[in-house]
Structures are given as C-alpha cells and as structure tokens.
Image (spheres, rainbow, N blue to C red):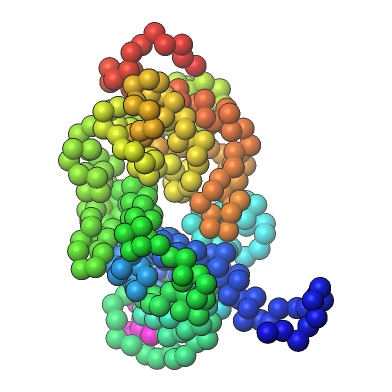
C-alpha cells in the first residue's frame, strides 16, 4: 500500500489533498444544493429551480436566471480559491454581504462529482458549456442557452467511495435537501424557488414578496393558518446584542417531533443556531408537549461584529459574542408574540 515505513511522515499527493479538502465543503447532496443556490442568489437570480434525483445521489440541477458568466469567467470560477466576491481579508473584516466568498464550492464539487455548467452572461450573444469531473476540466464549448446559469451535478462522490457509502437512504438525503431549499425560500420571499424530486414538484414559491405566502407554499395551509407574528424590534427587547427579532411562530398545538421546522436567519443568512431554537422552544413554557417543536421562522438582526458566521467551512454554524444575551432576547420576543395572540398564559415571570 505505501512505500513509507510505519511512523514516517509523508506529504500527501495533490489529488488526495484535494479530495480531502473538497469533503470539508461537500458532505452530502444537501451541501451541494446549498452552495449552488447561494451562488444563484449572489448572482441576483429571481427564479431558481432545484431538481434532484434519488435524494440528490443520482443528480442535482440548479438553474437560475442570474447574471451568468462569460466563457473566461466560468473557466476561472471552477479553479480553486477563485471568487468575484471579495478581494482580500480586509473585505471580509468589513463584512460581506454575499452568501459566498471562499471561492471553494465549484472547485470542491467538481473534485468529487461530474459537473456540467451551462451559462450565459447578461447581454452576451452566446453561452458556454463547461464539463468537468474529478477536478479536471474536460471540455469548454460554446452553447446556446438562456441568460443565467444551470449547474448539473451527477455521480456525487464517484471517486470517493468511502464517502459515497456513508450517504443515507434517498428519503433521508432528500429531507436534508428539502430543509436547505425551504430555508432559502423562507429567507427570500421575493425569490421564486421551485423544488422538484424524482419528477415530482415538492413546492414552488411565487416570489411575490410576503413571508405568509411563502409559508403557505412550503408548509401548506394548515401550518400557515397557525402562525402568529413575532415583532420584536429594539425598544421592546431586553438589553442584548440583537437589534431585532422578527418572523412567525406557530400555535403550540401545531408542532412536530423533530426540530427541522424551526428556521433561524441572521442578517438574512440561513444558519444553524441550536441555542436560538432552544430559546424559541423555551418561550412556549409548558404549552408545548415535551419533545415537540413548533414551526418557527425567526429573523435576527445584529451588527456583524457581534456574531461570527464563518465558524464552519459549511458556514451554517454561528457563534455569538454574547449568546445568553441573544437567546434571552429571542425568548422574550417569542413570549410576547404568543402572549399577544393569547396562546400562552400571562403571569409567568418574564424577561
Ligand atoms: P464563491 O461563491 O465563494 O465566490 P464559488 O466556487 O461558489 O465561490 O463560485 C466561484 C465564482 O463563480 C463566484 O464568485 C461567481 O463569480 C461565479 N459563479 C458561481 N455560480 C454562479 C452563478 N450561478 N451565476 C453567476 N456566477 C456564478
Ligand atoms: Mg459560492
């Protein structure tokens, strides 16, 4: 297997290094969907169609009507550490408004799958089709295509069998994809997002601009009618790092056994913040049956220096400078919302 003796330190070869690094970005089909949808949003798309087969294991396609790329740019975009979004670390410290900036995603996906990108930049007369696999660009050709970008990913992890083996059942992988797509749909009510799985439309949002309409599209009427608004801005909130806590939460009776319908957004970015979710649940007091979770869509606004959204390469986890302050504020805002709607008893100690 190796020429080196035991205990000897060797440098890994380049392709091994690349596949390991790619695994940090691409863990499963849902991470591919996340990266591609973020790219579409960063490219100003107003319509995004996400199509997956067998939970994304057989195929993932994300098509947008965004700015598109010129031939030169698409060739550059699939290289490692190439981005149009920041120039150097000072841009990062000043706070990035784009969802991406690491310049890793396309290269990483292209290292562990077969990828076809069809793209046409706005105002260009023709488009480009680029094909790559296993980290190598295979062909780049002119192509007739509409303005915008379509990225097709197939055979995820075909060259990393150990990873491929750890993918779960189609339904489980699809649940992750669905959660990601739902998160972006909820975060951007002016985005028209369609999600399709194995030739079935799972949901489609109109992009008409209201959170209520988006919730109706993704969760259906029963849930939409059970939601009450959360409207905590500066003055109503206890002291803490958050400038605002807004969104909607469900009646205590409208709940589920798993927490995946509690979505948190920080400054518009979909994040995983267990502490925030726990604070939402706590606000229900005893009204929620044990081990049940409400539906919740919670938008937090906070000054960028009080939160680190870059803790994890997959960028979903966040860390607050003052977590207990933030969670108290979330709890208070949700409590007020439930109280105003007459859904929890007043008189419990607050604040
Ligand atoms: P990042 O998003 O961190 O910049 P990516 O590897 O995801 O890195 O993308 C590299 C670059 O490719 C982006 O900075 C952008 O210029 C371009 N790009 C990727 N996807 C799209 C898209 N859907 N539409 C237009 N440009 C795109
Ligand atoms: Mg990106």
Q: Residue 202 at what x, y percent from top left? A: 23, 57
User: Which is more toward the observer, 152 or 155?
Assistant: 155
Quarter of the image where one finds residue 318: top right
Is residue 206 at least partly visible in the picture?
A: yes
The one nearer the camera, 199 or 102, is: 199
Location of residue 99 in the rendering, given as x and y in whole percent from the top left corner? 49, 57
Q: Residue furthest left?
A: 221
> Residue 123 colored magenta?
yes
The correct choice, above or below, for 121 with respect to 45 in the image is below
Please state the extent of the stretch shown in magenta in the rendering.
122-129
Q: Residue furthest top?
A: 347
Magenta span includes 350: no
Residue at 33% from the left image edge and 13% from the top image edge:
345
* Residue occupying the point 42% across, 11% down: 348
Q: Say which residue appears at 60% left-offset and 46% top-offset.
A: 308
Give the prevailing secondary structure in the magenta stretch. loop
Of the 4 image quadrants, the one containing the N terminus is bottom right
């Amino acid at each position: 297997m190796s020429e080196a003796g035991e205990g000897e330190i060797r440098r890994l070869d380049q392709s091994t290094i690349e596949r390991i690094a790619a695994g940090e970005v691409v863990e499963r089909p849902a991470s591919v969907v996340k990266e591609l949808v973020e790219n579409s949003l960063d490219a100003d798309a107003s319509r995004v169609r996400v199509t997956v087969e067998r939970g994304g294991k057989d195929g993932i396609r994300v098509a947008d009507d965004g700015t598109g790329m010129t031939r030169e740019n698409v060739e550059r975009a699939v290289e490692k550490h190439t981005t149009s979004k920041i120039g150097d670390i000072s841009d990062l410290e000043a706070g990035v408004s784009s969802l991406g900036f690491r310049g890793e995603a396309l290269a990483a996906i292209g290292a562990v799958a077969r990828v076809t990108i069809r793209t046409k930049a706005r105002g260009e007369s023709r488009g480009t089709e680029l094909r790559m696999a296993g980290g190598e660009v295979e062909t780049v050709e002119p192509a007739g295509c509409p303005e915008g970008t379509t990225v097709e990913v197939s055979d995820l992890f075909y060259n990393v069998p150990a990873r491929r083996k750890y993918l779960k059942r189609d339904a489980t992988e699809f649940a992750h994809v669905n959660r990601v797509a739902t998160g972006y749909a909820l975060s951007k009510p002016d985005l028209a997002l369609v999600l399709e799985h194995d030739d079935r439309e799972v949901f489609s949002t109109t992009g008409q601009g209201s959170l209520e309409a988006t919730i109706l599209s993704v969760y259906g009427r029963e849930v939409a009618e059970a939601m009450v608004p959360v409207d905590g801005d500066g003055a109503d909130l206890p002291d803490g790092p958050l400038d605002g806590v807004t969104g909607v939460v469900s009646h205590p009776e409208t709940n589920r056994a798993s927490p995946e319908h509690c979505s948190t957004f920080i400054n518009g970015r979909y994040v995983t913040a267990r502490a925030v979710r726990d604070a939402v649940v706590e606000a229900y007091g005893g009204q929620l049956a044990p081990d049940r979770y409400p539906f919740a869509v919670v938008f937090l606004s906070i000054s960028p220096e009080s939160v680190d959204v870059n803790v994890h390469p997959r960028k979903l986890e966040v860390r607050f400078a003052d977590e207990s302050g933030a969670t108290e504020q979330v709890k208070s805002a949700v409590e007020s919302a439930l109280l105003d709607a007459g859904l929890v008893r007043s008189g419990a100690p607050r604040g």
